[in-house]
Amino acid sequence: MVKKPAPDATRRSEKSRRAIYAAALALVGEVGYPRTTVEGIAARAGVGKQTIYRWWASKADVLLEAFLDLGEQAAQAAGQDTDAVPDTGDLAADLKAVLRATVDELLDPRFETPARALAAEGLVNDQLGREYVARLLEPQLQLYVARLRSARDVGQVRADVDPRIALELFVSPLAQRWLQRTGPITHAYTDTLVEYALHGIAPR
């Protein structure tokens, strides 16, 4: 009699984790953050509620981790490094490349729907808002800080420039336009933001 191989617990856990991520992102997009529950996520993912609580303390933790994973998956599919802004020696080209990829992500319904739900809830839910900034936004912003510091070190940016403030010249307008739908977000738009940020708007 041939003995069946033992079930691969690691593979089973990863399959469950993926199902939970997908369920959480789908629900928050469909019904909003307040109406998304751990019970609802579990039912949609086809797992027990205890499985979720074994890995996460709250629905916020599930959603934020799912959202982080979504961004990493998208970046990997596009062949991008999620741990750094490219440094080719051309600051403008590097910033434009990253912002173009950000535009593509923001316009992807898989990303946009849960992103809007989480961003909106973060404005009225202090705890979620703080976690959203600390776990999602600030790590991404620090990648820009590192790239701008590198540019400053080689004289491509003024020595007195604060990278954390400077990055807001191109990141914040994009976020504001996307959140409030004040205009289209395109590659041409973000390219222009970089040009304005690096060269200003005074006559040359």
Image (tube, rainbow, N blue to C red):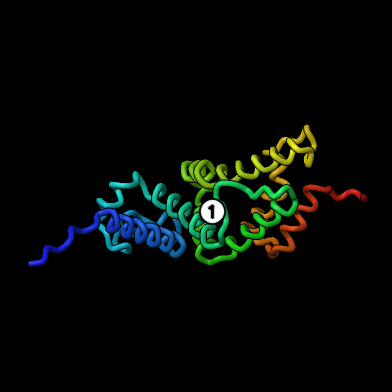
Q: Residue 28 or 88: which is nearer the viewer?
A: 88
Q: Residue at x 52, y 41 (%)?
A: 134
119 sits to left or right of 203:
left
Q: Residue 60 or 111: which is nearer the viewer?
A: 111
Q: Residue 31 or 87: which is nearer the viewer?
A: 87
> Residue 197 location in percent, x, y?
77, 48
The part of the image, by quadrant, that contains residue 183 is bottom right
184 sits to left or right of 29:
right
Q: Residue at x 62, y 59 (%)?
A: 101
Asked whether the viewer can see residue 116, the reply is no
Q: Residue at x 69, y 52 (%)?
A: 94
Label tally: 1
Q: Residues within 10 Å of mark 1 (few under 14, many from 20)?
A: some
Question: Please, what is the three-letter code of the amino acid marked with disc 1?
Answer: Ala
Residue projecting furthest to the front: 1
Residue projecting furthest to the left: 1
| Residue 177 versus residue 202 in the image, above or below | below
Q: Residue at x 65, y 61 (%)?
A: 181
- Residue beneath label 1, please? 120
Which quadrant holds the N terminus?
bottom left
Instruction: Say which element carries label 1.
Output: helix
